[in-house]
Amino acid sequence: MTDRNRSSARPWIVFTVVLAVLALAAGGAFLLLRPHGGSPFGVRPGAHITVGLRDKPTSLDICTNSERAVEQALVDNVYQTLVTMDGERAISANVAARWSESADGLRYSFQLRAGATFADGSPLDASAVVASLQRTIQNKQVGADGLAHVASVENPDGTTVVITLHEPNPRLLEALAGRAGVIVNPNAQNADFTRQSYGSGPFAVSAFTDDAIELTRNEHYWQDKPALARVTLRYMPSDEALVNGMRDGSLDVALPQGAQAAGELAKLDGVQVRDGVSTRKTLVAFNNAGSSPFSDEQVRRFTRFAIDAAQIARTQPDAKEQLSGPISQLQPGYEDLNALFPFDLARAQSMRSYFAAGYFTPFTLLADDAHRDLAQQIVDEMAAIPLPVSLEVVNAATLASRVETGDYTCALIEMDDPHDYTRFVDGSAMFGYQNGAAQEQYAKALAQTDFASYREQLRAFDRIVGQDAASAWLYTGKDVVAAQSHVQGLPVDLTGWRLPLAHVRA
């Protein structure tokens, strides 16, 4: 090409580059300006995946069925809550776009999103929210206990909901992000909640069979529609069946319950296995009742020094992170307390030396067969102090019953309720734990007028109970998600609790 030709071509090259840059900028702006939670890869008319799960809900009645399985399947997919919690466990917008609280904590005003509808196309307006919340309270439905102290629920206009309390309840927003805040269509005709759905989420239930729930894209969904047209939640009898389903391709996603199955899934070609934090806590429970050696704070403390919780959390296949207090990582009030009781056998033995050689009578560490190996490891660590402990293995039902009634000295257990830390407040037989400072601090947390202050005061409660060695916490468990390579956008944290599918692509 001659210099003249190059010169005459240069303006066109520059013009083309400028157009390309502007196009890229416009595309970037489009992505940035999309509504939060959109599907950037677009809706696919026939996209369908099958998700393998273990525990099938006995009914779809979100109002009366307290099973975690119904919440896992339906909340965030079929039903939405007034507010929600983000990845940092802070309250964030959902059906309500924003809210305000009075300084005395007695009045909450929520501004709803414009244009929201239920799956049948009827408006999700303030009157619908009020009717749903009032029905939860009046009929004492699942989550109603989270709406304690509510004096009234009103809608001064079509987009505003006002909740007035008799006295402050700093956990109100947390409750409204949970089952108490589920919004159900109050205008549903001939409703059969056990088999049908009446929500505003990205999907609706199209079928409920013996082994599956069929979810279909909600074409009236008021935010960006999900990329998937249909999702089959298939309930399998065992982890082995989940592995086989992923192996033969009949499942696109699997949520196993056991670490062994997770390991087998990781070996399959084209299958990606990821894990996130769950609410499941594994701990050595101490019976703090007067007849138990663990009624003595020093015994509890030197036992914690002798148990290598950090090493256990690193090596147990079902462990996600070490835990050293009653509140786990994704719960309001969590504080990292792992530095309180590092493994230090020499220190444990030194503290033990203040007790006479025959001070302790023989006792057992209670465990079920699924945790036999870990329980034996802990027995060996306690025996090295030394303590006269041996292992007693029982079935899971017996373990749960004996711990609940306080018929044990120490036990290796799992707890999986977001608010089970209150068992260290109520003085129940389960732990036989009485600590005035912990009770006072918990009462102080509940007396706050806002969620942020409540969360900070709850952190102080977590530290008091952890420092007092009320039990020996070991680790928080994993929620495992396995997916075929073509499936993208799956969540990982708390999937045993909720499995939101609106952003999943295939």
Image (cartoon, rainbow, N blue to C red):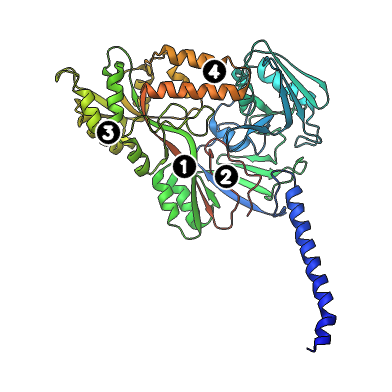
Question: Taking 371 as reference, is 165 above or below it?
Answer: above
Instruction: Judge depth for marks 1 and 2 and give the one in front.
Output: 2
Determine which quarter of the picture holds residue 224.
top right
Look at the numbered disc 4 and give the secondary structure of its residue. helix
Sequence-wise, the earlier of marks 2 and 4 is: 4
Residue bearing the label numbered 4: 445
x and y, in percent, of residue 433 in the image? 38, 16
Residue bearing the label numbered 1: 237
Look at the numbered disc 1 and give the secondary structure of its residue. loop
Badge number at residue 344: 3
x and y, in percent, of residue 74 in the image? 62, 36
Instruction: Judge depth for marks 3 and 2 and give the one in front.
Output: 3
Whether residue 189 is visible to the viewer of this picture, yes or no, is no
Instruction: Judge depth for marks 3 and 4 and give the one in front.
Output: 3
The alpha-carbon separation of the residues under discs 3 and 1 comes to: 43 Å
Determine which quarter of the picture holds residue 121.
top right
Q: Disc 3, disc 4: CB below 8 Å?
A: no
Neighbours of disc 4 within 10 Å: few (<14), some (14-19), many (20+) = many
The alpha-carbon separation of the residues under discs 1 and 2 comes to: 23 Å
Sequence-wise, the earlier of marks 1 and 2 is: 1
